[in-house]
Amino acid sequence: MNAAKAKLAFDFDNRVARVALAAPKANILDRAMIAALAAAFEELGPRRDLAAIVLSAEGPHFSFGASVEEHLPGQIGETLSALHALLRRLVELPAPTIAAVRGQCLGGGFELVLACDLILAEETARLGSPEIKLGVFPPAAAVLLPVRIGVSRAVESVLTGAGWTGKAAAEFGLVARTAPEGELESQLARWLESDFLPRSPAALRHAARAIRRPIHRVLTEELPELERLYLEELMREPDAAEGIRAFLEKRQPRWCQKGEAA
């Protein structure tokens, strides 16, 4: 395993590729982790024999999200561009992608999961986009959530930071299947055995390509505009840097316009 994959566990087993974030417990999606994932996806690109690609994580949590430190002015441009390029690469992978989620799955980690074809989550997992609480917003979630769960529920999530348990997310269709706590791997194994390994790799590859069209469209056509909005407009607002610094300093943010009339 090369240095770019130092934060990943990456292997193949019976026509299933497994890519696992391997920096527990937080599995922060920093630029090093993003680079490692990009290298793994690049290696998977030419494969034509896969029944599925599983994205998971070591430890009790999938991911606490992107690196907050790397969201400070002067760093966020590189971080955001790398993450969005990774998501576009993810939706070009040559087999169905399954995110296997336990524990916390937040922020950039949640956006990574949203770009997968299917989500398997423990009933007690927590999924969501809390960025608004830091004075920013999640560009990728803002384009992916309306496609996956409808506009009204997506608006509530992005504007309030509300999240869901795996069980609740399954009730409105974001999570395809759930597993009781501690049974994620066994449920995943049964799902792979019944619905993916018996199928033609060529059929799965082309079916995934077909069904991803709405997600591929928003990631390629709409996300670049939200990236520009974030970097060129939001990051000029003092509140954006204040919210991130407040989080790092473990204090309440002092918003510049708090209490002022619009």
Image (cartoon, grey):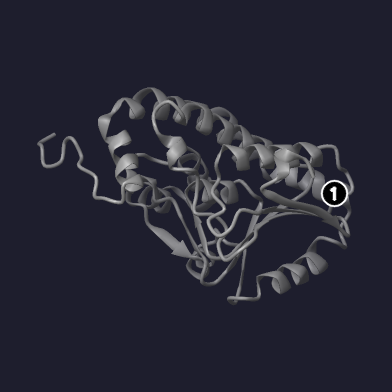
Mark 1 residue type: Ala
The image shows residue 65, relative to residue 230, as above or below, that is below
Left or right, 237 with reference to 95: left
| Quadrant location of the C terminus in the rendered image | top left
In which image quadrant can residue 40 be found?
A: top right
Instruction: Please state which of residues 22 and 231 is positioned toward the viewer in this rendering.
Output: 22
In which image quadrant can residue 86 be found?
A: top right
Instruction: Please state which of residues 4 and 123 is positioned toward the viewer in this rendering.
Output: 4
What residue appears at the point 58 percent right and 32 percent down from the top-left corner?
82
Instruction: Please state which of residues 158 and 31 is positioned toward the viewer in this rendering.
Output: 31
Q: How many marks?
A: 1
What residue appears at the point 51 percent right and 71 percent down from the top-left corner?
124
Q: Position of residue 57 (x, y in %)?
A: 64, 58
Farthest top residue in view: 232
Question: 10 Å neighbourhood of mark 1: few (<14), some, or many (≥20)?
Answer: few
In which image quadrant can residue 153 be found?
A: bottom left
Left or right, 65 with reference to 33: left
Question: What residue is pinned by disc 1?
Answer: 203
Q: Position of residue 116 (x, y in %)?
A: 64, 49
What residue appears at the point 85 percent right and 61 percent down from the top-left corner?
197
What residue appears at the point 77 percent right and 47 percent down from the top-left corner?
207
Is residue 135 at all visible to an observer of this figure? no
Q: Position of residue 163 (x, y in %)?
A: 42, 59
